[in-house]
Image (tube, helix red, strand yellow):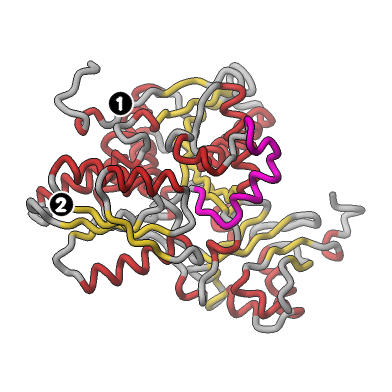
């Protein structure tokens, strides 16, 4: 839970897919800050240079990148403006064919 | 009317059953559409029969023809049954990390299986199948991920069946794979009542399945139209296993693992409706029965009572 409203200095857990781990020195989960998804990505890019460019293209999420905040696809809850708060879990996954 | 000219014509008309024990209240109710009651035991019979019928009408499928399809199991099994009866040969490209039962059932109906490597999951199966289709232009590539007959099967059957049985429906929840079920059923329900929420539950597999060589190898099915969906949830193996057991223990429904993911999302929506003090009729899809997944041990009775262990065992598997 957020404490004393000081959300921006508290951390958000971000799960990194295998294919992007070269940017995070192989870390599977990293901490980030930000009030919305755009902020989280900007923070990630600052700590792990180049990662932002793999997620965004012309200021929008790349077609083959899916991002979930607490298991919900961000494209349906505001995209890059989707709010994120301390304690939230952000999962990044490449879009792959589902089983059928 | 429960009499049909043949097994194939008995597809669909599946029961929609209430879940009195898992529904949170009298005004927030869950309803399960039992698609395991189809001829080969999964919702994929609807799409498979529709795609074959359409290819026959288009003159693409002629006697003795060979059908090619990438599949993790259910669509292949449906196609194999129809192909056997109608005299077509079927070649399935299937990831090697799928349950043994799926392979056994495909072989039982005479399908040939080409295994694609585990890393990359269905993504890799689609890639290999597309390559084979290019090299063998005489084969009929039905391609469920981009074949409009797939989603139309749900627009013309699944959607109307659900709306007739549950005109008060507020939410429709289904799995997201080819996206055919959600696109077709979702569009029909929206046409009937624009307020119905269409929700996708997408299985989140272990890391191996997302093992692409680079992001540009990612894949979004050609059938997918984001505007049909209201929300989309990613559900991991642990929640899926827990829910598939709940469905068995509390309602007596023996379903496949992906249905656990769908139930998990449905229960989250039900909880939201309760909190908001709003009535809800939430219909969700039971994609198939649990028979094909018994060997995975997720049902727990004897060989794998611990959810964490059962989840770990699924980590490298394409479980939906």
Protein chain holding label 1:
B
Q: Could you tell which of marks 2 and 1 lies nearer the N-terminus?
A: 1
Judge from the rendering whether residue B59 lies leftward or rightward of residue B316; answer left or right: left
Mark 1 lies on a secondary structure that is loop
CA separation in Å, label 2 and label 1: 23 Å
Q: Which residues are magenta?
A: B301-319
* Image spot of residue B306 (x, y percent): 70, 39
* Image spot of residue A43 (x, y percent): 74, 74
Task: Out of B27 and B76, give the one closest to the viewer.
Answer: B76
> According to the image, label 1 marks what residue?
B13
Residue at point 48%, 68% (across, down):
A63
Task: Out of B273 and B65, give the one closest to the viewer.
Answer: B65
Residue at point 28%, 34% (across, down):
B157
Marks 2/1 in contact by CB < 8 Å: the verdict is no
Residue at point 35%, 68% (across, down):
B128
Instruction: Look at the image and tell me whether residue B285 can be seen.
Output: no
The quadrant holding residue B29 is: top right
Magenta region, main secondary structure = loop
Mark 2: few, some, or many residues within 10 Å (few <14, many ≥20)? some
Mark 1: few, some, or many residues within 10 Å (few <14, many ≥20)? some
Residue at point 57%, 55% (across, down):
B205
* Image spot of residue B273 (x, y percent): 62, 31
Task: Give yes or no for residue B308 being in the magenta stretch.
Answer: yes
Tally the numbered discs.
Answer: 2
* Image spot of residue B114 (x, y percent): 33, 61
Task: Give yes or no for residue A77 being in the magenta stretch.
Answer: no
> According to the image, label 2 marks what residue?
B55
Which residue of the protein is positioned furthest toward the bottom in this rendering? A49
């Amino acid at each position: 839970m957020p404490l004393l409203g000081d959300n921006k200095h508290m951390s958000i857990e971000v799960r990194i897919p295998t294919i992007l781990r070269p940017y995070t020195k192989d870390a599977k989960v990293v901490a980030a800050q930000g009030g919305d998804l755009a902020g989280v990505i900007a923070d990630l890019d600052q700590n792990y240079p180049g990662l932002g460019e793999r997620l965004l293209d012309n200021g929008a999420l790349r077609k083959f990148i899916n991002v979930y905040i607490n298991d919900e696809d961000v494209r349906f809850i505001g995209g890059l403006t989707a709010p994120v708060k301390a304690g939230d879990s952000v999962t990044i996954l490449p879009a792959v064919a589902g089983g059928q | 009317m429960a009499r049909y000219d043949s097994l194939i014509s008995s597809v669909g008309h599946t029961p929609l059953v209430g879940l009195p024990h898992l529904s949170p209240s009298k005004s927030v109710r869950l309803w399960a559409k039992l698609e395991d009651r189809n001829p080969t035991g999964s919702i994929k019979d609807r799409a498979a029969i529709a795609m074959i019928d359409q290819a026959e009408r288009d003159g693409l499928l002629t006697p003795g023809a060979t059908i090619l399809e990438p599949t993790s199991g259910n669509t292949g099994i449906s196609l194999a049954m129809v192909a056997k009866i109608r005299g077509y040969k079927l070649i399935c490209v299937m990831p090697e990390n799928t349950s043994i039962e799926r392979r056994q059932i495909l072989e039982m109906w005479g399908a040939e299986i080409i295994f694609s490597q585990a890393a990359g999951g269905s993504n890799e199966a689609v890639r290999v199948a597309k390559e084979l289709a290019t090299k063998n232009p005489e084969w009929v590539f039905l391609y469920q991920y981009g074949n409009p007959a797939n989603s139309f099967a749900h627009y013309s059957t699944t959607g109307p069946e659900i709306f007739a049985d549950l005109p008060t429906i507020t939410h429709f929840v289904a799995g997201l794979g080819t996206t055919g079920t959600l696109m077709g059923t979702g569009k029909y329900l929206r046409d009937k009542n624009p307020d119905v929420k269409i929700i996708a539950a997408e299985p989140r597999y272990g890391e191996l399945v997302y093992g692409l060589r680079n992001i540009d190898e990612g894949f979004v099915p050609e059938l997918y139209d984001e505007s049909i969906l209201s929300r989309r949830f990613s559900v991991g193996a642990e929640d899926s296993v827990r829910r598939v057991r709940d469905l068995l223990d509390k309602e007596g429904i023996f379903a496949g693992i992906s249905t656990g993911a769908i139930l998990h999302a449905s229960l989250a929506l039900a909880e939201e409706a309760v909190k908001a003090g709003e009535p809800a009729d939430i219909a969700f899809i039971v994609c198939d029965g649990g028979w094909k997944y018994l060997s995975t041990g997720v049902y727990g009775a004897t060989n794998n009572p611990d959810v964490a262990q059962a989840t770990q065992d699924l980590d490298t598997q394409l479980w939906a």
